[in-house]
Image (cartoon, helix red, strand yellow):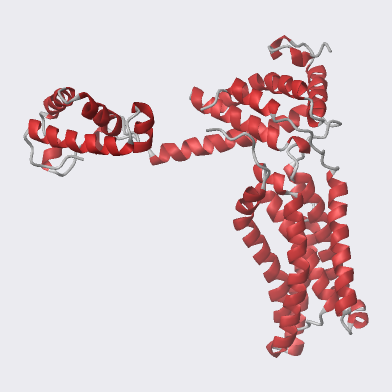
Amino acid sequence: MITTPDLIAALAADAKPVRRLLPPLARAVGWLAFGVLLLSFLGIVHGLRPDLADHLRRPVFVVGTLAALITGVSAAVACFLISLPDRSRLWVLLPAPSLAVWVSTIGYGCLTDWALIGPSGLQVGEAFRCFVTLALTSVPLSLVMIVMLRYAAMLRPTLVTITGSLSVAAITATSLSLFHSIDASMMILIWNLGTAALIVTLGGALGPRLLASLSPQRMPDRA
Amino acid sequence: MTSAASQRSSAAVPDPEERDRDRALLMARAQAGDRRAYRRLLEDITPFIRALAARRLRETSEVEDAVQEVLLTVHAIRHTYDPRRPFAPWLAAIANRRIADQLRRQTRRNLRHAAFSLQHETFSVAEANLEDARSDAAALRAAVEGLPSGQRRAIKLLKLEEMSLKEAAATSGMSIAALKVATHRALGTLRKVLGSPRRST
């Protein structure tokens, strides 16, 4: 094993200039701006759902969508904050209130819709288009976030992955509720809660390893 | 610059705030590529990291491993430090994280290597409980000493010190093939000398 003074000498010799990170809020805003760009692009290509105006008169829809959006924004801010070593991990609680509201509106909408429409509302065609929107929103958002946060693998990989995934899931859910007329209770339940749970679980399970493999090379390696 | 960082012994520095400012300044210069400032900073923080690690880790080698892990992490993510913020919390968070990792590794290793208690040493196989095991060991040691030097070295490195073939080759300067042949021959000789038909491992 290399001795500590030798290691210090080696690290000092390797001290190339580095670019400091921007403040976490600025980075969160940057990432969210990318999200807005992505959603506007989808909006132009796909078009908003035809019955959006009707839905905007329904308080549950408005509250649910707003709560999802706020969850997405606050989880992103929390994620960029706790990715830094000297910030409190309590920031993880920032998206909790809006998350609670969002989840509770999903449950409510699902119950009322179930009674009105019934389980036959699950259509393959719409499901497939939903899935495309889902992938087009969540995959680029996740990839950009992973690249922006790869250094966090060495500090709090699990917390960062969970808040990051929550943010991606919430923004994806927001985009789904704007672009797709998915009134059937099963659909909302599967997509909103299911994708959030899936992304958080997958992110929690694979994220640390994924981030670790992408994290900056630790020079020099000890023999 | 008459900075606190230039003094190796951090205990001699009176004002922690001033020391923190010095370290923040040194890190800011290190981020800009100033190798001398960076070296001074690393030398300055090492005793602090070591003290932090020694509080939670028992063995000196574990402590030193943790110190080096912390230094490597500091190096890898030095761009995440914002010089407008205090340096100590940034360093302490990294150090605590790496020390906790080291502690976890140590615990896992200890779980795998459970120490045998006296009860564990009684096996159901009759030969394992022979009273004269000690004299057997003495006979084996004598037999090993009686081997030709190449064979003796191979047996000692591979079987008694449990090195891998690669490590043994590096230590002895013998090739892997030569080590294998020597071990094979040595085992044959030992079997003959000790008069046991059983295959020794």
The answer to whether one can see residue B5 in this image is yes
The answer to whether one can see residue B114 in this image is no
Instruction: Judge left or right: residue B159 versus residue B188.
Output: right
| Residue A205 horizontal/vertical position (percent) | 60, 57
Q: Quadrant of residue A174?
A: bottom right
Q: Residue at x 82, y 71 (%)?
A: A175
Instruction: Judge left or right: residue A145 versus residue B47.
Output: right
Is B72 placed above or below A118 here? above
| Residue B185 horizontal/vertical position (percent) | 17, 36
The front one of A129 and A183 is A129
| Residue B60 horizontal/vertical position (percent) | 50, 22
Q: Quadrant of residue B134?
A: top left
Q: Quadrant of residue B86?
A: top right
Is A124 placed above or below B83 here? below
The front one of B66 and A87 is B66
| Residue B54 horizontal/vertical position (percent) | 56, 23
Is A55 placed above or below A152 here? below
Q: Residue at x 22, y 27 (%)?
A: B152
The front one of A3 and B95 is A3
